[in-house]
Every structure is written in C-alpha cells, then in structure tokens.
Amino acid sequence: MRILVASTYTIPAYSGGWTTPLDLFGDEHRVMYVVRNFERGTHTIEGVKCVGTGSSMSPWPRAERFRSAYFQNQFEKTLTKQFSLFNADFVLCLDPNAGYAAANAGLPYAMRFHSPAEEDVTTEKFKKLLDDSVFCISGPTTFIPGVEVIPHNQDLSRFNYRENNSAQKAILLTSINRFREPDLFIEGVMLSKKISGDIVGTGIDRKRIASLCRATGNRVRCLPPVPRLKVPALLNNYQIGVATVKKVPVHYQMKVNGYMASGLFTLSKPWTHIAIEAPELVRTFTTARELADQLDFLNENWLETLETRRQARDWINKHYSVEIPRKRFREILNEKFSS
C-alpha cells in the first residue's frame, strides 16, 4: 500500500516516530512523511521522502493565540496536497494533531499513537477522532480505552551481536530531558571506579547536559545524535547499555532491545519493561551509587556475564521481533482494505 505518515513532532532519521513505523512497514509498503514541526520543504532522508511544513514553536509576541491555528492549517493543506501527489491509500497519523488535520481535510486516516495522547481522551472531540478513523492502534506506553496495543518493535536484524573480552564503556542512548535522567547516568559513571560513558541523543536539556559532561574531563561525553540506520554500528563500541527513567508503573524503553541484540549488558531501572518481563537478564539500580556499583560489578566480573548476554540476545529476538507487530499490522490492513 501507499502510506502517508503524518506527525507533529517526529525528527526524521532520529526519533521513534521515524524508526518504528519504517521498521514496521519494512519493504512491504511505499511510504512518505509529512511532519509539521520540521524544516519547511521537501527532503529525502534514508531514501524516504519527507515534507516539512516549517512550524515554529517560538511564540508570536503580537499574535500568539493565532500561531497554533495557523500552523495547523498549513499542516492540513500540506497533507491534502501530498496525499494527492503521492496517490496515498490512507494517512497514518502518529498523534492527535495529525489526526485532526487529516480528518478536517476529509482524508481517510488511521491512528497509530506513538506516544501518550496529548489531551483528555474522554472528550467528545477525541472520541470522534477515533470513531472516524479507519483503525486505531497504540504503542506500549499509550493506553487508550478500546484501542489495540501493537508493540513498537525494531527490526533487530539490523543489529550486530558482539562479544567483548572486557567492559570499559557504557552508553545512555536517550532523549535528553529530565524525565530520562541523564544527570543520574553522569553521576553514576563518575562514582564508578573505571567505567567511562557516553550520552547520545537529542533533547531540550542537551546544552545543559553537554556542559556537565565537559566538567567531567570527558570521562562522560555528550555526543551528537545518530540516525537509526547507524545505531547498530554505534552500539558495537560499548559493552554496557544503561536505561534511566523516572519512576512510572511500567516504562517501555526501546533502546534496551537494541542493547541486548548487540550483546551489551543492560542496566535499567526496576520499572523498565525488561526488568519486569525478564529480570534474570538485567541488573537494576535506582540511585547513582547503585548504578556505580553495578558498573563496577560488570567491570570486575565481565566474563561471568557471557551466558546471560547470550540468553538476552536470544530472548529479545524471540519476544521483540518486528515480525510480531508486522503480522498484526498485515491482518488489520487486510481487514480494513480488503480490496
């Protein structure tokens, strides 16, 4: 099928709203993107056409109340134009803003919520958005009554499993913001005896975290973000993968899947999905001191973790294969587009 993906916030090549849909589609569908908050114009990124509408998040001092409505209208116009030019079968919308734009344009649309809905899901407006869609699915961190959850699994065949003889370097692959706790990673690495660490990603706190890293004498570095197709090669430079996040009931962190598929040993918070689903495959921490202790343990007992790392690779490939959501996605498309 020809699928036009619409998103408000996706960062092409880098964010989950780019990675998980493209991994889900594989080579089975033709796809292009329209992204509201991306550089205006037509771009080709990783072989995928992407049209940005150039929306600005900056306030308009003399017309702030019109800003959002103006850019939403531009988003809608661009969707309408690109839907026709691409000869799309439907628009797959990754957030409510995208859904409302497609609905107002009268385009056939489906909802695939990549992250939690941005509004009260009990409103009539939101209920109508769901009711008028061709189908609705959501990811593992988004729970909307009546909406089916399909995992945001990556294509793990892209990752190269590697066995190293020692553990010297840790990585935090993350969105750099306070919720993801990059400060805790920095403190934990600095409290450890020998481990060095890198933070890799984009985010609103990147400038602050980069400054903190420079103060460590580059024992902890804040490195530029890496596009999804280069993440597998990046991970092969490390032995330990860290997943930090503030406490929530259960939090799905896609980075963990890549860590395990690549042969890294994963350290995570106890509420990260992997610590709940397969606790024997990870070691957990809640404080910087505990993280440092776990880093030291791996550094001193690395070869003893080999069997766990192999089991983690096998487990993640079995339970988080992209073929799991692909199978269900095919079924949904066959049900909704039988012709």
Image: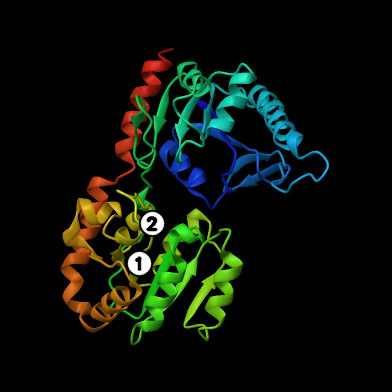
Image quadrant assignment for residue 335: top left
Q: Nearer the viewer, residue 319 or 143?
A: 143
Could you say whether the residue bearing mark 1 is in a helix, strand or loop? Answer: strand
Q: Residues within 10 Å of mark 2 (few under 14, many from 20)?
A: some
* Residue at point 55%, 51% (across, down): 13
* Residue 35 drawn at (x, y percent): 63, 39
Q: Are marks 1 and 2 in contact (CB under 8 Å)?
A: yes
Q: Calculate the distance from the C-alpha at mark 1 to the C-alpha at mark 2.
A: 8 Å
Figure disc tally? 2
Instruction: Please state the horizontal and vertical placement of residue 219, each as a whole percent of the image.
Output: 47, 83
290 sits to left or right of 230: left
Sequence order check: which comes first, mark 1 or mark 2?
1
Residue 48: in sight, yes or no? Answer: yes
Q: Which residue is mark 2?
A: 255
Task: Please tell me in which quadrant of the rendered image residue 86 appears.
Answer: top right
Instruction: Determine the residue positioned at 67% across, 27% down.
Output: 76
Relative to residue 209, is residue 269 drawn left or right?
left
As shown in the figure, which amino acid type bears the numbered disc 2?
A: Lys
Q: Nearer the viewer, residue 250 or 338?
A: 250
Expressed as whole percent of the image width and height from the top left, the position of residue 26 reads 43, 39
Q: Which residue is mark 1?
A: 241
Q: Secondary structure at mark 2?
A: helix
Question: Relative to 124, is 51 on the left or the right?
Answer: right
Whether residue 165 appears in this view of the structure is no
